């Protein structure tokens, strides 16, 4: 190894993308009872940046992104999304949730509503967009995720991959500034993972700000601007994908990568 | 995609479910009767013994039943048929119950036709096989109800009831056809029209009262609110104010229009028979449902006052027999009214009690349904920025209610049978008419009680069984239990 030694970088507070900070997490702790799930998380995500969070299960990755839209309440520190600080005030929470989309591992489509109603529900009820306009947007989004013919179906009639693409369209319908992906492909059969990842790649190329919790290392390598490795509720190592996968510095990172690759 | 039918979401929220899951049953291989008997009834020694014992018992029951019916004298039912149906309603005002019945038939036909068409359209859009019920299929679907109505009328001594029943059937079918053919935009509003017609049918009998005005006003306000919601909503406070203002205006207008009609009608004290049993059940359900849903949500509330109050109410009412509550309404509730206040009729107070009673049970059923909705559903709705109220109303409740339909209908059936308890506070409901009839000079001491009880039992059974069948049909349609 003739390369100069790289200093281990566990500092995630240099926002990428356009440089404008979209999400800022500072000194954040999260407890579940006595168990501390997150330790002193400091992270910034820039506009148009794609950050992939990896790590063993139980490392707090999902908890981290769930605190950003207050599906979990953080106990210490601060979270600021696009200039709005997340407090206990319901109006603040709603404002952040409006601008922050989330895609879940188990899709969480609404089974009692058709695909088009799933997509138009939030725009119509949160943004007060007229029905016709909301449906036109929904059809465009379905084109974009390549399933326009499924608009009248119900979630139960579709494959997992199709459901997850509807879930992405549902999130996009709110025109969010950030999308949080919580292991979006973990509940899918292998042959469907690609169609969902392709949709996510398209989004990244179009400049969407994304935080993606995933085990898909290929995706991380290809799409991520930065990779954040978490273990035991801490950010252990941060880096660009190339550096991260070829030349990890921390022992825990090396161990994890050797297990997963 | 601007020409999408506007009814789908509304239809879903109203509850007529579009998913038509045609469950293919295993192809039944037809066997010759002899082979079928051999295979199913006498396949082995144990099966044969069971068949013989059950067969013998059934034969004994049928034999003695038939022998008793042949010997029985149904004159008491013939004489009292009117009492069984409508109690002591003034004889020269009989057109009122008939008119009321025809209005209800109109409502049923119109609403069922329109909703069936909506469900059919939605199923077609989804590419699910759907069909419109043909008349023979309708008859098969509602045969217990049709049969029992014909059975009731067969005891009539004049021709008028036959004509009346025939016109009820004709009106139902006619308006079902009309409801089916209404344009889609009308069909999504037909529930409100139906509700207004239903209250109207009450007004024909009971006359205009403040209650009638109140009911009409509430319907008008809800209708207005949904119309405003259908139009391009104005965001923020202005939209809310407009919705609220227009709804309040609709309420006031409807209330005064009804209150201005100068007709006092016939009060509840004149009512009786199966009419009052059905009426009490319908009121108990329509008022108990919203109240029960609120109680269920209240019991899960984070606010200690609401949570405790809901829990105390539910647990108190569920822990006390309905009879004691009814007696309480009759003997004690009047003491709670201010002296200047006119004490309501016995039936009014009984209905208050029955509404509260069914609400407590419905609340527990709904609570089970609420718990069954996965947490991810709430999270997905919250994550999109919906307010807590909308998360409950648009996401959690529709799924919860759907899951508890069978239990809910079970509750409705037992509520219907519980209306027989109204007799102990002196209301001549369906079952109580048997006592009245057997006390008449012409029949007293003739041991005719079994005849009248049989008649009443058949009446209760037909309505309860129809509800149970419809519930199972809905269950199949919704795919509950076949997830």
Image (cartoon, helix red, strand yellow):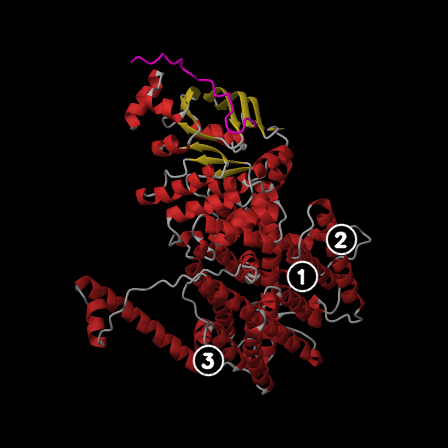
Residue neighbourhood size for the residue with mark 2, other residues' Cα within 10 Å, grouped as few (<14), some (14–19), many (≥20): some
Query: Residue B347: which numbered mark, if any?
Result: 1
* Chain of the residue on which disc 2 is drawn: B
Query: Residue A134: which numbered mark, if any?
Result: none
Helix, strand or loop at label 3? It is loop
From the viewer's perspective, is A28 left or right of A192? right
Q: Which residue appears at 61% of the width and 53% of the height?
A: B290
Using the rendered image of the protein, determine whether residue B192 is visible from the camera's viewpoint: yes
C-alpha span from label 1 to label 2? 34 Å
**For this rendering, which residue is in front, B352 or A128?**
A128
The image quadrant where one finds the N terminus of chain A is top left
| Residue linked to disc 3 | B72
Q: Which residue appears at 18% of the width and 66% of the height?
A: B43
The stretch in magenta equals A1-20
Q: Do discs 3 and 2 share a chain?
A: yes
Helix, strand or loop at label 2? It is helix
C-alpha span from label 1 to label 3? 35 Å
| Residue linked to disc 2 | B245
Q: Nearer the viewer, mark 1 or mark 2?
A: 2
**Number of numbered discs present?**
3
C-alpha span from label 3 to label 2? 64 Å
- Main SS category, magenta section: loop
Using the rendered image of the protein, determine whether residue B373 is visible from the camera's viewpoint: no
Q: Nearer the viewer, mark 1 or mark 3?
A: 1
Q: Which residue appears at 40% of the width and 15% of the height?
A: A8
**Considering only order in the chain, which callout, 2 or 1, is on the residue closer to the N terminus?**
2
* Chain of the residue on which disc 3 is drawn: B
- Indicate whether residue A154 is drawn in magenta: no
């Amino acid at each position: 190894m003739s390369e100069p030694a790289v200093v281990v970088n566990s500092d995630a507070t240099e926002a990428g993308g356009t440089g404008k900070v979209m999400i800022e997490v500072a000194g954040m702790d999260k407890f579940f009872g006595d168990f501390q799930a997150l330790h002193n998380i400091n992270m910034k995500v820039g506009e148009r940046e794609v950050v992939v969070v990896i790590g063993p299960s139980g490392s707090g990755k999902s908890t981290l992104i769930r605190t950003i839209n207050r599906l979990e309440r953080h106990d210490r520190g601060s979270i600021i999304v696009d200039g709005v600080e997340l407090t206990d005030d319901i109006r603040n929470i709603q404002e952040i949730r409006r601008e922050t989309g989330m895609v879940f591992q188990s899709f969480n489509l609404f089974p009692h509503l058709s695909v088009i109603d799933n997509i138009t529900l939030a725009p119509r009820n949160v943004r007060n967009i007229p029905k016709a306009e909301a449906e036109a947007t929904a059809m465009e989004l379905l084109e974009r995720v390549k399933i326009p013919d499924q608009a009248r179906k119900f979630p139960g009639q579709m494959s997992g991959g199709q459901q997850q693409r509807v879930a992405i369209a549902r999130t996009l319908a709110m025109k969010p500034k950030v999308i949080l992906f919580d292991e979006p492909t973990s509940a899918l059969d292998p042959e469907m993972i690609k169609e969902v990842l392709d949709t996510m790649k398209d989004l990244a190329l179009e400049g969407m700000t994304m935080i993606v919790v995933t085990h898909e290392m290929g995706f991380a390598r290809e799409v991520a601007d930065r990779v954040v490795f978490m273990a035991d509720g801490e950010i252990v190592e941060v880096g660009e994908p190339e550096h991260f996968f070829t030349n990890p510095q921390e022992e825990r990172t090396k161990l994890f990568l050797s297990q997963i690759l | 995609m601007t020409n999408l039918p506007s009814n789908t979401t509304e239809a879903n929220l109203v509850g007529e479910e579009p998913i038509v899951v045609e469950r293919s049953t295993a192809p039944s291989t037809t066997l010759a009767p002899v082979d079928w008997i051999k295979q199913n009834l006498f396949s082995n020694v144990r099966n044969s013994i069971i068949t013989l014992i059950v067969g013998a018992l059934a034969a004994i029951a049928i034999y003695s039943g038939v022998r008793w019916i042949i010997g029985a004298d149904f004159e008491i039912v013939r004489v009292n048929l009117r009492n069984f149906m409508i109690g002591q309603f003034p004889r020269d005002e009989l057109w009122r119950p008939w008119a009321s019945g025809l209005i209800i038939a109109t409502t049923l036909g119109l609403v069922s036709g329109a909703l069936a068409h909506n469900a059919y359209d939605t199923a077609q859009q989804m590419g699910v096989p759907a069909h419109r019920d043909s008349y023979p299929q309708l008859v098969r679907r509602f045969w217990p109800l049709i049969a029992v109505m014909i059975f009731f009328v067969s005891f009539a001594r004049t021709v008028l009831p036959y004509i009346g029943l025939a016109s009820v059937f004709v009106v139902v079918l006619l308006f079902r056809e009309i409801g089916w053919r209404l344009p889609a935009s009308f069909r999504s509003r037909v529930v409100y029209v139906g509700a207004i017609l239903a209250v109207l049918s009450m007004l024909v009998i009971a006359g205009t009262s403040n209650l009638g005005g109140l009911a009409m006003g509430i319907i008008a306000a809800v209708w207005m609110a949904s119309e405003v919601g259908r139009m391009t909503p104005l965001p923020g406070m202005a939209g809310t104010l407009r919705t609220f203002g227009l709804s309040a205006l609709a309420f006031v207008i409807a209330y005064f229009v009804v209150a201005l009609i100068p007709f006092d009608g016939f009060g509840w004290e004149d009512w009786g028979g199966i009419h009052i049993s059905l009426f009490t059940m319908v009121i108990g359900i329509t008022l108990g449902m919203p109240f029960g849903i609120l109680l269920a949500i209240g019991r899960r509330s984070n606010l200690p006052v609401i949570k405790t109050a809901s829990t105390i109410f539910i647990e108190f009412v569920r822990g006390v027999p309905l009879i004691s509550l009814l007696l309480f309404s009759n003997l004690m509730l009047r003491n709670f009214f201010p002296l200047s206040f006119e004490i309501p009729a016995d039936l009014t107070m009984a209905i208050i009690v029955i509404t509260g009673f069914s609400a407590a049970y419905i609340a527990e059923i709904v609570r089970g349904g609420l718990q069954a909705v996965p947490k991810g559903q709430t999270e997905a709705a919250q994550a999109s920025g919906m307010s807590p109220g909308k998360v409950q109303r648009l996401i959690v409740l529709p799924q919860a209610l759907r899951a508890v339909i069978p239990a809910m209908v079970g509750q409705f059936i037992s509520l219907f049978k519980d209306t027989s308890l109204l007799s102990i506070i002196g209301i001549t409901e369906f079952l109580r008419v048997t006592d009245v009839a057997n006390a008449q000079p012409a029949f007293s001491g003739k041991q005719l009680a079994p005849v009248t009880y049989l008649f009443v039992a058949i009446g209760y059974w037909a309505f309860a069984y129809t509800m149970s069948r419809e519930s199972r049909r809905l269950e199949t349609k919704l795919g509950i239990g076949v997830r």
